């Protein structure tokens, strides 16, 4: 087994969620990786095609992508099922939820434009390390000789994030993921969303209290449309909906 990366025509299409280009099993590209590559290779021209693709996915699905279509989100959900003490959401986690916007600005936009390197992919992305870096290094013997301090740093970051995910629900999604930050901007207008029937709602706040994300209300920028609020609403006032059905 030597390990290889698919480079066919489909690789020019972005998947909705984080999907490392270098993953041996990936047949599509990552929107974050594509955006960074577009910024650093376009000589400061706007990568309209990539931005258009991300905007289209955001307008249609928003953070529903985070809840159901991102492979790394699924990994975090699995890790959170490990029976260890859990860190409940609080004022600190709500403040930390803004960190992903800083990561977006610095590592996805500024560093690619200034240093001409894909900052988030190179220095942070745990999904890339887990899905691509480790499998390729294990499968491809010649790559092992190239492993250095940067790869060790990426493995360290990955391990810390994965460990935290078992204690704190979706640590990466809530505090770090710049793709989630981008999709959150589309929360008010995304076609797919969650609807609260105001005629049935008694404002008991069971939806926000039981939600593991740092939401202030159903369907806000932190909502990943996981459906937990639908299951626990005592008045059956919450449901998945399309934009045209919202009130």
Image (cartoon, grey):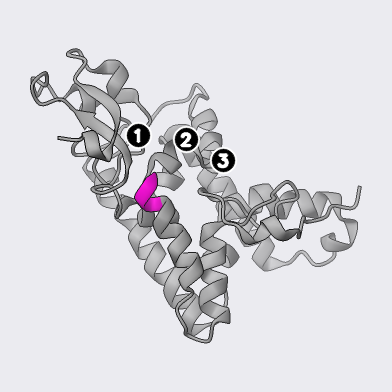
Query: In the image, is residue 1 above or below residue 213?
Result: below
Residue 7 sits in which quadrant? bottom right
Q: Is residue 176 left or right of residue 126?
A: left
Q: Is residue 101 magenta?
A: no
Residue under the point 30% across and 37% down: 193
Which label belongs to residue 225? 1
3 and 2 marks in contact (CB < 8 Å): no
Dot 2 or dot 1, earlier in sequence: 2
Q: Is residue 178 visible?
A: no
Q: Is residue 61 magenta?
A: yes
- Which residues fall within the magenta stretch? 58-62
Residue under the point 86% across and 55% down: 140
Secondary structure at badge 1 equals loop
Q: Residue furthest bottom?
A: 43
Q: Residues within 10 Å of mark 3 (few under 14, many from 20)?
A: some
Residue under the point 29% across and 55% down: 185
Q: Position of residue 34 (x, y in %)?
A: 56, 65
Q: Which residue is mark 2?
A: 68
Which label belongs to residue 37? none
Query: In the image, is residue 30 above or below residue 231?
Result: below
Q: Position of residue 83 (x, y in %)?
A: 50, 21
Dot 3 or dot 1, earlier in sequence: 3
Q: Which residue is mark 3?
A: 71
Q: Position of residue 86 (x, y in %)?
A: 39, 29
């Amino acid at each position: 087994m030597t390990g290889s990366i698919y480079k066919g025509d489909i690789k020019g299409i972005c998947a909705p969620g984080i999907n490392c280009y270098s993953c041996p099993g990936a047949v599509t590209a990552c929107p974050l990786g594509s955006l960074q590559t577009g910024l650093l290779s376009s000589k400061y021209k706007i990568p309209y095609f990539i931005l258009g693709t991300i905007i289209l996915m955001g307008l249609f699905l928003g953070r529903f992508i985070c809840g159901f279509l991102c492979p790394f989100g699924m990994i975090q959900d699995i890790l959170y099922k490990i029976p260890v003490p859990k860190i409940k959401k609080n004022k600190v986690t709500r403040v930390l939820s803004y960190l992903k916007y800083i990561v977006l600005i610095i590592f996805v936009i500024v560093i690619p434009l200034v240093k001409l390197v894909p900052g988030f992919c190179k220095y942070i992305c745990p999904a890339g390390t887990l899905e691509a870096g480790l499998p390729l290094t294990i499968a491809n013997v010649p790559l092992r000789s190239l492993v250095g301090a940067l790869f060790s740093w990426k493995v360290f970051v990955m391990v810390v994030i994965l460990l935290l995910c078992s204690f704190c629900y979706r640590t990466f999604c809530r505090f770090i993921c710049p793709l989630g930050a981008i999709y959150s901007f589309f929360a008010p207008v995304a076609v797919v969303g969650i609807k609260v029937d105001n005629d049935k709602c008694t404002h008991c706040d069971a939806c926000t209290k039981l939600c593991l994300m740092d939401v202030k209300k159903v369907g806000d920028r932190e909502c990943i449309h996981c459906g937990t609020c639908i299951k626990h609403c005592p008045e059956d006032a919450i449901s998945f909906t399309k934009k045209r059905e919202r009130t």
